[in-house]
Amino acid sequence: MAWDRNQMAERAAQELEDGMYVNLGIGIPTLVANYVGDKDITLQSENGMLGMGPFPYEGEEDPDLINAGKQTITELNRTSYFDSAMSFGMIRGGKIAAAILGAMEVSEEGDLANWMIPGKLVKGMGGAMDLVAGVRKVIVVMDHTNKAGESKLLKSCTLPLTGKGVVNRIITNLGVLDVVEGGLRIVETADGVTEEEIRAATDATIVT
Amino acid sequence: MKKVYDNATEALDGLLHDGMLIAAGGFGLCGIPELLISAIRDSGVKDLTVASNNAGVDDFGLGLLLETKQVKKMMSSYVGENAEFMRQFLSEELELEFNPQGTLAERMRAGGAGIAGFYTKTGYGTQIAEGKEVKVFDGEHYILERGIFADLSIVKAWKADDTGNLVFRKTARNFNPAAAMCGKVCVVEVEEIVPRGSLDPDCIHLPGVYVHRLIEGQHEKRIEKVTTRQREEA
């Protein structure tokens, strides 16, 4: 049995250590917040906030308080606010320990593509290029294959890049892989998934 | 010198001309200068280049200036919420210069701080780096980005005194300080102008030196995505 969305998020939460300042992307990465348990984790929202709280109760939404996905949120007793230039200063400056992001493609050299499909709707990179260039550890959480069953872990990306050589670790529905010298190394398999199955579903070079 | 004006139209009087570069604060619909945007639409000024993280939605924010085709070019990081934007971009009626979000903020900050350009790792090896100088510092690749020097800044703050000292509220601060800094002239709209001396000088987010004109007004403050959680049962 491969991992489902929540199990992938739960596995990604194991990457976080006490005291970390972390930026979570949209989609499965957002779910990671549900699994941090007792760990002292401060979430950054790149529109200008550290210490992001949960969604507000109905009727308590504040138009001046949103996350980077433009959703209404709340503050915590540790929260601080700042402007966009300082927000990305702390991102580029390496003050944020980890970013957990979704992806369309990752290459065996750690290249990441997650912002654009040429010829289709072009929305923009938002803060993704800054995040992958600046945070100390970039963890990608995504399905191992696309809807057509093709590997999303490639020898080289076919889509426009978000960053070159930026990904450290990839958590998919099949397992956990690290970007290492010469390719990807399997560090963990999902329950009931074999290394052979991961190899068969992966286009990128797997090294041991 | 008097900075406080009666309304957005008066505050923009004499400042608008076709083909100008405007820097706008706001993130999504949060903290956008909605009153000044409406007044710019009503002025009919055209061929604008607008540096703003987003482009509003179809009927609110900068979307109003797209609807009337007053914008020639946008400098933004994310424009996914606006269908009219996409239509005009795909039919080549509108130019779009994508900027990584942090690069856009730093370009505004730099412009306002008298910095013509800076080197950043963001975007190295991507299509954003095409045509830009690459330089290696301590073994790492950086690309050259230029400061933005805008003709006009339009900004939304929460409170101001009549000298233009500004206080922002929560995540509505976002791009507003950087946008305010990078304009030759900066016009600010606030929810409340408070008496001089009532703002704590230690808690001013942006000093009045950056602010030239100021208005107070009613804001719609539309929410783009209302998300809530269930109340726990008592």
Image (cartoon, helix red, strand yellow):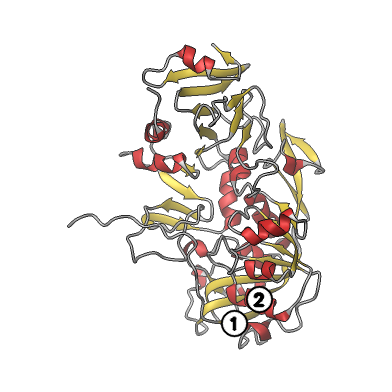
Location of residue A58 (image quadrant)? bottom left
Q: Mark 2 falls on what kind of element?
A: strand
Q: Report helix, strand or loop for mark 1.
A: strand
**Residue A74 makes an appearance in the image:** yes
Q: Amino acid at mark 1?
A: Ile
Q: Residues within 10 Å of mark 2 (few under 14, many from 20)?
A: many
Q: Chain of mark 2?
A: B
Chain for mark 1? B
Q: Is residue B27 above or below residue A198?
A: below
Q: Position of residue A177 (x, y in %)?
A: 51, 22
Q: Are the numbered discs 2 and 1 placed on the same chain, yes or no?
A: yes
What residue did someone put label 2 on? B187
Q: Residue furthest front?
A: A148
Name the residue rendered at 62%, 33% in the picture. A112
Q: Are marks 2 and 1 in contact (CB under 8 Å)?
A: yes
Residue B232 on image: x %, y %: 23, 54
Judging depth in this view, the residue of A102 and A166 nearest the camera is A102
Which residue, as the protein is rendered here, is positioned at the far left? B234
Q: Locate residue B154 relative to residue B201 in the image: left or right.
A: right
Residue A42 position (above or below residue A195): below
Residue beneath disc 1? B215
Query: Along the horizontal axis of the image, is A8 left or right of B213?
Result: left
Instruction: Name the N-terminal-most of marks 2 and 1.
Output: 2
How far is mark 2 from mark 1, CA to CA? 8 Å
Residue A45 marker: none
Give the percent coordinates (x, y) of residue A204: 60, 20
For this view, does A19 lie left or right of residue B216?
left
Indicate the quadrant containing the C terminus of chain B: top left, top right, bottom left or bottom right: bottom left
In this view, the residue in front, A207 or A119, is A119
